[in-house]
Image (spheres, helix red, strand yellow):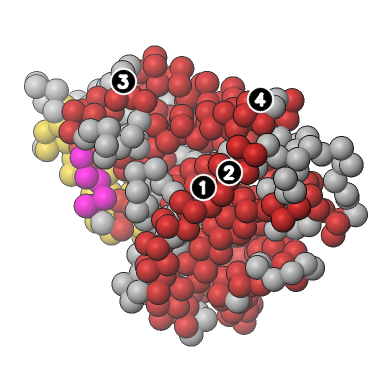
Amino acid sequence: MSWGWFTADEYWLSRLVFQKMLAALYLVAFVCAVNQFRALLGERGLLPIPRFLERVDFRRAPSLFHLHYSDRFFAVLAGSGAVVSAALLGGVADLLPVWGCLLLWAVPWVLYLSIVNVGQTWYAFGWESLLLETGFLAIFLGPAHTSVPTLVLWLLLWLLFRLEFGAGLIKMRGDRCWRDLTCLYFHHETQPMPGPLSWHFHHLPRWMHRVEALANHGAQLVVPFVLFAPQPAAGVAAGIVIVTQGWLMISGNFSWLNALTITLAVSAVSGTAVGVSAPDDLTAPPLWYGTLIIAVTAGIAVLSYWPVRNLLGRGQVMNYSFNQFHLVNTYGAFGSVTRDRYEVIVEGTDADALSADTVWREYEFKGKPGNPYRRPPQVAPYHLRLDWQLWFLSLSPRYGGRWLPVFVRKLLDGDPDVRRLLRHDPFDGRPPTFLRARLFHYRFTTPAEKAETRAWWVREPVGTVVRTCRLGTDGTPVVV
C-alpha cells in the first residue's frame, strides 16, 4: 500500500525540533508539580487532593489518583513524569519501534492529565489544557526513523489556529481598549507577573504601544489563516507567530504558554526552508499506525464542533475544556485589561501584643511584586502557582475561595511546606504571633523616579484583604 498522501517528510526536522521542545516543557511542568504539590495539594495542603477525590468521581475527573493517593505516590508519579520527559528530550523514543514510541509519549500525557484533573484552582490555567492537547497529538507523530504523518501536522496547525484566533477574537469582542489600540498603555504594568523588561516595555512611547496592539491583531486574526496555505507562506506565518510570542516572552511571565505556542508554530516550518532534508532511509508507517491516525483525526474533527461553536457564538468563553481529557479546547487571553495594579501584601509580627508601634514584617514571594526595590524576576516557563493566585486575589476576595483561610492558618502555624513557596520568610521558620494581609496599589516608577530612588515600583496601601488575626486555641485564625 502506498502512503505517499499520508506522509510529509519535508517536515522531518520540524517534527524533531517540536518533539524536543515539547519534552523540555513537559519536564518543566513535572518539576513544577514536584516542587509545589505538597503545600498546595498534598494531604496537609491548602486544597488536599484526598478531600477532592471524596467529592469527585473518576468519570468527572479521570486520574490515576482515584486508585490511590498519598504524598509519596504523587511524588513518585510526578517524578516519573520528569524522568520520562528527560528521556524523550534525550531521544530515547526515536530508538524504539513505532508502537514503543507511541506508548512512551503517552506516559507523560497520562501522568499530567492525572495531576491536572485533581489540581483544582492551582491547575485551572489555559496552558495546562494546551500542554495536554499538544501532548496528546504528539503521541502520534512517530519516531525519527519513520515518515512524518501529514494528518498529525494538520491537527497541530488546527490547534495553533484555535489558540491564536481564539485569543484574537476574545480581545476584539472584549475590552474596548483593544479596538482603540490603547490596551498596551496598561498591560505591561498590570499583567499578572511582570518580568525584568516589563518596566522598559511600559515606558515605550505610546505610538509604539498602539503599534504593538495593531500587530497583535494582525498576528492573531489574520496570520492564523495563512498557516494553512502552501509553503513558503505557511512558514512565514509560523515565523510571525514565533516572533510575536517571543516578544511576549521577554515582556512578561506567562508560564509555558508562549514557549508552547512557539513549539506548535515550529511544526508549520518546512525543513526545506532552512536547507535540511529528511534522511533517505525513513521507513513507511505500518498499516495499523495509519489506521490509528485516521481514527484520531476523525475523533478530533467530531470534538471540534464545540470549540468552533464557541468561536462563532456571541458568548465566547476563554480557556475552557469541553471534555475531561482536555482535548480540542477553546483558548484565549486578556479579553479585558486592568487599568490599575493591586497587590496583596502579607505581613506578620512576633510582638506579644499589638500597639501603634508594632513592627510588621513582610513575607516575600518568589515571582509577584512585593519589595518596590526588587526588579521583577524572570520566572517563565516555570509556573509559580501561589503567586498567580495571589494576583487573582488582588482583583477580588472571591478568588481566595477555600484556600486563603488555610494559607493564613499555615503561616500562623509556621508550616514548613508553605514556607518553601516563599522567597523570604521574615521569621526564619518561627510562627508569627499576628498576621494580616493588606491591599496595595502599585505602579511602575517613572524614569525620573527610578533614577532618583532606584525603585521599580511606587506603592500605597488602599485596603485590607485579611484582618489582623492570631492562631486560636483550636488551631484556627481568630480576628483581633
Mark 2 or 3: in front is 2
Mark 3 or 4: in front is 3
Judged left or right of residue 369, residue 48 is left
Mark 3 nearby-residue class (10 Å; few <14, some 14–19, many ≥20): few
Amino acid on which the number 2 mark rests in the picture? Thr
* Mark linked to residue 295: 1
User: Sequence-wise, which precedes: disc 3 or disc 4?
Assistant: 3
Q: CA distance from mark 1 to mark 3?
A: 29 Å
According to the picture, the residue beneath numbered tag 3 turns out to be 67
Q: CA distance from mark 1 to mark 2?
A: 6 Å
Amino acid on which the number 4 mark rests in the picture? Ala
* Mark linked to residue 291: 2
Q: CA distance from mark 3 to mark 4?
A: 26 Å
The residue segment tinted magenta is 397-402
Do we see residue 145 in this rendering?
yes
Mark 2 nearby-residue class (10 Å; few <14, some 14–19, many ≥20): few
Residue found at x 37% / y 69%: 309
Q: CA distance from mark 2 to mark 3?
A: 32 Å
Q: CA distance from mark 2 to mark 4?
A: 27 Å
Q: Nearer the viewer, residue 127 or 435?
A: 127
Mark 4 nearby-residue class (10 Å; few <14, some 14–19, many ≥20): some
Disc 2 and disc 4 in contact, CB within 8 angstroms: no
In reply to whether residue 213 is colored magenta, the answer given is no
User: Sequence-wise, which precedes: disc 2 or disc 3?
Assistant: 3
Do we see residue 28 in this rendering?
no
User: Sequence-wise, which precedes: disc 4 or disc 1?
Assistant: 4
* The C terminus lies in quadrant: top left
